[in-house]
Structures are given as structure tokens and as C-alpha cells.
Image (cartoon, rainbow, N blue to C red):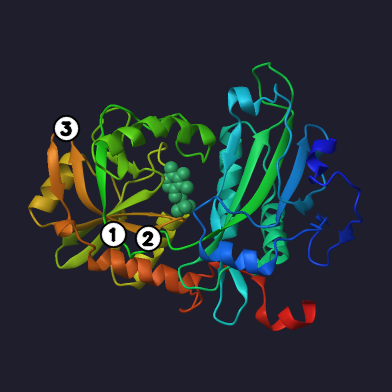
Amino acid sequence: MPSCYLHDGLGVNRPTMPSPTTTLEVRPTATPLPAAEREQRIRNPAFGRVFTDHMVLIPYRAGPGWGGGVLQPYGPISLDPSASVLHYGQAIFEGFKAYRQPDGGIKTYRPEANAARFSASARRLAMPELPTARFVEAADALIRQDRDWVPSEVGHSLYVRPLMIATEAALGVRPASQYLFLLFASPAGLYFPKGIKPVTVWLSDEYVRAAPGGTGAAKCAGNYAASLLAQRQAEGEGCDQVVWLDAIERRYVEEMGGMNVFFVYREGGRTVLVTPEQSGSLLPGITRASILELARDLGFDAAERRVSVDEWAAAVREGRMTEAFACGTAAVVTPIGTVKSRQGTFSVHGGETGPVAAKVREVLLDIQHGRAPDRHGWMHEVWAARTAPAER
Ligand SMILES: *Cc1c(COP(=O)(O)O)cnc(C)c1O
């Protein structure tokens, strides 16, 4: 393994120890953040700026395949300037959360689903697939090591960020022969500290996020690079977020920023949650999939179908559509209050949060925080409260 993977910023060889719960080599930091400072950072985590004490690295080489992983102090990694990720963008990532449970234990939400999507993203970018067991093990090991970083307050969580980059030092345009899987974590506070507030969205008819046959269904870094200008344009129009339309007709709603979208219809006395069907260019969100299943538990109907911008405006005008909301791991559920485009502006549910969005959000948070039974088997135990005193 190249020494860069092992660099821990301390420049000394420190003893390593086997961990009882992981096949990763565990090299704990000699200088964890003092508890008082950690508590302070957990209380005020500007999203994605504060990281826990450790990270996981697993190298890959064509031939031998995935190597042994290391859990080591969080810090910079070194890359050759010719590393192919820096030129041709083979970079994918994931995001999911660990939640403190009422008994003090810790669980993650559907990590195997993230592992499966990570593999799908890897395939699309001609990158190697990390086995699900190793993906989940890496997250479990990091969360156990840094368990004191998992917040206890409701709505707070530890956001886990796995990623993979092409590290081969070579400028030839082809899939790289060397990769690095990394996983680190960041405490996350309430996405909306002042309570959920509906967003205003801009319908982008100038830029598209992804096209059929492209990489839209993969969680790859390049999709985000391609989205930033449109997001900036949306902000210039006084909006919070950009809503993406299909690349060909620029008529059908795909997603909102980095979140999937749901429309709430009243049809024949029933409440129907409609989300755009998987077009090949929208990202199949795990929150989206969860809400499709939860809808039935809540007595709603659910459907995946295309919804055009014209249909959105008409359904709201005619009272057939009562709400719209976006969903994703980071913000869970975000109501869409106002829709703006070159054609004009309209509001959904009077620009206010509707009862269906509020209910879906509450039900998801209750499952994640262990306040409601986990009927779908979505929660993955990382740290059991009852073993905590003995193991600590
Ligand atoms: C990650 C992501 C989502 C939401 O996926 P979740 O698994 O629900 O967090 C939606 N759209 C895009 C473009 C994304 O990158």
C-alpha cells in the first residue's frame, strides 16, 4: 500500500491494535478532540465543516483487488497531480446517517441500500465495486470508534460520507487501475433550525442536470459540478433551489437540487403521493424509495409517473394537487411552497407546509430515532446500548 494512505499527520509509527468488531486495522488517534470541545462542535455543527476524529481508507488495485482497510486519524490525504480523478472525474459518493436511539444505542438507516447504490454508481463510472459487507463494516467501525460524536438530540445525527476516487497516476483516458475508498463522518444538526420552512424553487429551462444515457442515476461528483451554475441562477432569481426538467422536452419534472420530488394529489377521495418515475436520469433516492413504501402504511396511495410542469400548475390551480415536497437524507422532507419560472409563479398549499409533508417527515424521523417500530427492517444496529458499559 502506498505510504500516502497510511499518513496520519503525526509522522511517527504508532502501535496498531486489532479491533474485535472489524477486519480493519485500527490505528486510533493519539490526540482525540477533548470532550468539551467535541460537545461544543456537536452542538453547533455548520453542516459538513466539522468531522469526527477518524476516517476509513481502503485501497484498490487492478489484479489483487481491494486491499486491507485502515481506520486512522481524520486528515488530509496525498494524491499525485496526475491522479486520474483530478482530470477525468472518476469520483462517486454516498450519504447516510447514524442516529442515537432512546436507549443510548446507535443505528444507521438503510446502509445496505446505500452500499447497493454505491455499487451501481461504480459500475456506471467503470470503477470497481466494493462488497456491501465491507462498505457497511467500514461505516460501523468508524461510528463505533467515534460513537461519542453521535448527537443525542432529536433531529440531530451523524452524517456518514463514503466516497471512491481514481488514484492511478496516469493521464491516459481509460478506467484507472487504482482507486481509494474513503469514509468519514460529520455531526449534523437540524437542517432547518427554525422549523421546516417551504422552499421557493426555480424551474430551470436553460440547464439540465442529466440526460438519458448519461450519469444522472449515478451519485457521481460530476453531476454536482454540472448543477452549480443552475443553482446559482436559481438563487439569482430569488429562489432557494433549482428544479430540474427532463433533458429532451424540458417539460417533465425530474428532481429538486440534490433531492427527489413528491406531488400530493387528491384523486377520488384518496391521497396519492406521486413521484417522477425513474427516467434513467434521475437519482434513485433511498428516502424516495422509503416514502413510496411508507405511503401505504399511512393509508395513502403511491405512484411513480411523469409529471409535467404544465400539469403541476394545472393540478394546483384545479385543486387536484394539494402539496409538493422534496426528500433526501440531509433534509428528510422539505415542502415546496412557491414555484417560479420564466412563465410565471404559483404557490402550492398557499406557500405553507401541508399536513402530508409534515406527516411523512414525522413518521420517517420517528423510525430513524427509534421512537416508532421499525416495521420494514430499515434500521441497522451499530452500537447496542446494553453492551456499552462493558465495552467502554
Ligand atoms: C443523494 C441524492 C438524492 C437523494 O437520495 P437519498 O438516498 O434519499 O439521500 C436525490 N437526488 C440527487 C441528485 C442525489 O445526489
Which marked residue is nearer to the observer: mark 1 or mark 3? 1
First of labels 1, 2 by sequence position: 2
First of labels 2, 3 by sequence position: 2
* Residue at 46% across, 36% down: 224
* Residue at 30% across, 45% down: 240
Label 3 element class: loop
Label 1 element class: loop
Q: Which amino acid lies under the numbered mark 3 shown in the image of this protein?
A: Arg
Q: How many marks?
A: 3
Residue 153 horizontal/vertical position (percent): 50, 73
Q: Which amino acid lies under the numbered mark 2 shown in the image of this protein?
A: Phe
Mark 1 to mark 2: distance in Å?
7 Å
Q: Which mark is residue 158?
A: none
Mark 1 surroundings: few (<14), some (14-19) or many (≥20) residues within 10 A: some
Q: From this viewpoint, is residue 215 visible?
A: no
Disc 1 marks which residue?
A: 197
Mark 3 surroundings: few (<14), some (14-19) or many (≥20) residues within 10 A: few
Quarter containing the N terminus:
top right
Mark 2 to mark 3: distance in Å?
28 Å
Q: Which of the two residues, 388 or 366, is positioned nearer the viewer here?
A: 388
Residue 385 horizontal/vertical position (percent): 66, 80
| Pointers 1 and 3 in contact (C-beta within 8 Å) | no
Q: Which mark is residue 342?
A: 3
Q: Which amino acid lies under the numbered mark 1 shown in the image of this protein?
A: Lys
Residue 6 horizontal/vertical position (percent): 82, 43
Q: From this viewpoint, is residue 252 visible?
A: yes
| Pointers 1 and 2 in contact (C-beta within 8 Å) | yes
Disc 2 marks which residue?
A: 192
Quadrant hosting residue 65: top right
